[in-house]
């Protein structure tokens, strides 16, 4: 405890000279704990044992009794020699010896020829063939002390330790208040250090409901780049113009990094930290929801798609108009048309002010979804800029307005190291597919409809089933159930 609290007076002195109202409050909450530091420094050794029953934890000089017992334990033989010398001088018996026997313990041995010189305070203990063994009260007490010293030291040290511990426990409220103040100071100091070192800016925080970031950067990724500069990006997300941003572009281009950086900048700003950007104005968000990545839940037997849908359902149930939603590749865990339908339904629900109207970043490979921006207000398309040069693809890492004109899947596969023959064959197949069966986009739904319009299924049972559905009141999850039932009827 001692080394860290020793700096408390210095910390308090530095804080007292600062103008910050928050730091002044923290300074007042800072107890230097001088009495507790002094107690621990006097009572406990610098390197105590692992358990309190081992002894050797009370510092020398704290307890006279412990010091005496240690001295006896460590210098028992010299104590016996002192008694021997003293008794020789008192009695005049020059061949007097203090001996130790496992059976009889410590005793004074006197030869037969000098027994008549033994003083009255000697107590006969044993008669030998060539002499007598005696004990004195002093020798008896010293013997008892030596033989019991170890156990007595351990017991006494534990007793002293518990007294120190109880004193500290009684002062727990003071220690905890100081710990909380130090924790807050530590966080603020780290905020300041990282802001200066990484050239962060001070964000503006308001209740506008808008997120405006100029040249924002990902605070982690930019630190991991050793031989390249991080490409900053702007973000305008909020009440007017763009509540929902649909982001398209190839894999590895930086869509997920961009969305994560917006979430992190928003979170850092509301924590009170400077942010990695040139300018930032953050309208307070009540919650940040993310649906990024894909994984099975093997323990509960849930597939990737089921896990994804469960998370999306939780987001749509709990988000509000002041929330920030980060949704990456919704619907990719199922068939193309099912996934596209679900993704569109979620998009429309998020964009609909009457139902949610949350600020949303939505990355997708379904290029057909980009048509939504033409039917729904507040929805805009963005893509990651890509440049082709001599047959190679270069990721520019820049977010630009508009939908991506290609998914660049084959080019990404090439970058990933797929064999050239496989890449060439993939291009041939892609060309045939694009010629023979151009992708059909789902028919757009009106803005007040939270469902993707279905294809004309004709009369009969499917028509009756559709006519029974009240689309105005359907939630996205209910829409999924309807789709599933209709698919079973095909």
Image (spheres, helix red, strand yellow):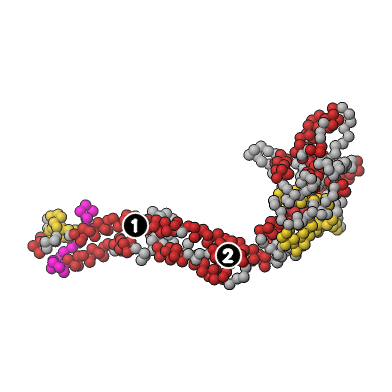
Is residue 226 highlighted in magenta?
Answer: no
Residue at 79%, 38% (x, y): give it. Answer: 473
Q: How crowded is mark 2: few (under 14 residues within 10 Å), some or many (20 or more)?
A: few
48, 479: nearer the viewer? 479
The residue identified by callout 2 is 25
Residue at 36%, 66% (x, y): give it. Answer: 61
Residue at 56%, 70% (x, y): give it. Answer: 16
Q: Is residue 340 visible?
A: no
Magenta residues (range): 88-106
Question: Residue 191: which disc?
Answer: none
161, 448: nearer the viewer? 448
Image coords of residue 258 (percent x, y): 75, 55
Is residue 104 highlighted in magenta?
Answer: yes
The answer to whether the residues at label 2 and label 1 have Cβ atoms under 8 Å apart is no
- How far apart marks 2 and 1 lie (CA) works out to 43 Å
Does 50 appear above or below 369? below
The image quarter containing residue 126 is bottom left
Q: Can residue 35 be seen in this view?
A: yes
The image quarter containing residue 456 is top right
249, 33: nearer the viewer? 33
State which tag comes first along the sequence, 2 or 1: 2
Image coords of residue 482 (percent x, y): 78, 34
* Helix, strand or loop at mark 2: helix
Mark nearer the viewer, 2 or 1: 2
Question: Residue 156: which disc?
Answer: 1
Residue at 81%, 38% (x, y): give it. Answer: 472
| Residue ranking furthest to the bottom | 17
| Residue ranking furthest to the right | 435
Q: Is residue 283 left or right of residue 387?
A: left
181, 228: nearer the viewer? 181
């Amino acid at each position: 405890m001692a080394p860290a609290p020793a700096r408390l007076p210095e910390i308090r002195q530095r804080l007292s000279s600062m103008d910050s109202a928050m730091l002044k409050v923290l300074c007042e909450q800072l107890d230097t704990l001088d009495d507790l530091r002094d107690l621990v420094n006097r009572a406990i050794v610098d390197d105590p044992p692992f358990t309190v029953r081992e002894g050797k934890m009370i510092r020398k000089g704290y307890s006279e009794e412990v010091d005496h017992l240690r001295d006896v334990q460590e210098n028992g033989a010299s104590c016996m020699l002192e008694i021997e010398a003293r008794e020789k001088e008192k009695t005049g018996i020059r061949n007097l010896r203090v001996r130790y026997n496992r059976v009889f313990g410590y005793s004074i041995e006197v030869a037969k020829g000098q027994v008549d010189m033994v003083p009255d305070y000697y107590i006969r203990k044993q008669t030998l063939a060539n002499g007598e063994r005696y004990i004195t009260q002093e020798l008896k007490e010293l013997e008892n002390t030596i033989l019991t010293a170890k156990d007595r030291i351990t017991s006494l040290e534990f007793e002293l330790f518990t007294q120190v511990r109880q004193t500290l426990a009684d002062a727990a409220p003071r220690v905890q208040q100081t710990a909380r103040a130090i924790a807050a100071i530590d966080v603020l100091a780290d905020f300041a250090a990282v802001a200066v070192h990484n050239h962060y800016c001070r964000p503006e925080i308001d209740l506008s409901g808008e997120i405006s970031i100029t040249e924002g950067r990902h605070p982690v990724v930019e630190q991991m780049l050793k031989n390249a500069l991080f490409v900053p990006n702007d973000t305008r997300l909020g009440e007017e113009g763009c509540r929902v941003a649909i982001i398209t572009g190839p894999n590895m281009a930086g869509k997920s990094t961009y969305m994560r950086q917006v979430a992190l900048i928003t979170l850092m700003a509301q924590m009170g930290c400077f942010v990695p950007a040139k300018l930032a104005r953050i309208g307070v968000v009540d919650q940040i929801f993310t649906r990024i990545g894909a994984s099975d839940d093997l323990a509960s037997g849930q597939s990737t798609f089921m896990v994804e849908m469960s998370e999306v359902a939780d987001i749509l149930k709990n988000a509000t108009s002041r929330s920030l939603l980060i949704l990456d590749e919704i619907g990719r865990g199922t068939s193309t048309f099912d996934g596209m339908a679900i993704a569109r339904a979620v998009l429309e629900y998020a964009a609909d002010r009457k139902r949610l109207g949350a600020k949303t970043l939505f990355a997708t490979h379904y290029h057909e979804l980009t048509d939504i921006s033409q039917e729904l207000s507040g929805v805009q398309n963005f893509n990651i800029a890509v440049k082709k040069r001599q047959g190679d693809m270069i990721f520019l890492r820049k977010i630009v307005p508009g939908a991506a004109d290609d998914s660049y899947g084959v080019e990404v596969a090439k970058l990933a190291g797929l064999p050239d023959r496989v890449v060439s064959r993939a291009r041939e197949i892609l060309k045939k597919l694009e010629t023979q069966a151009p992708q059909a986009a789902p028919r757009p739904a009106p803005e007040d409809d939270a469902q993707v319009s279905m294809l004309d299924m004709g009369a009969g049972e499917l028509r009756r089933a559709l006519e029974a559905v009240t689309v105005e009141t359907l939630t996205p999850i209910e829409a999924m159930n309807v789709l599933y039932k209709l698919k079973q009827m095909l």
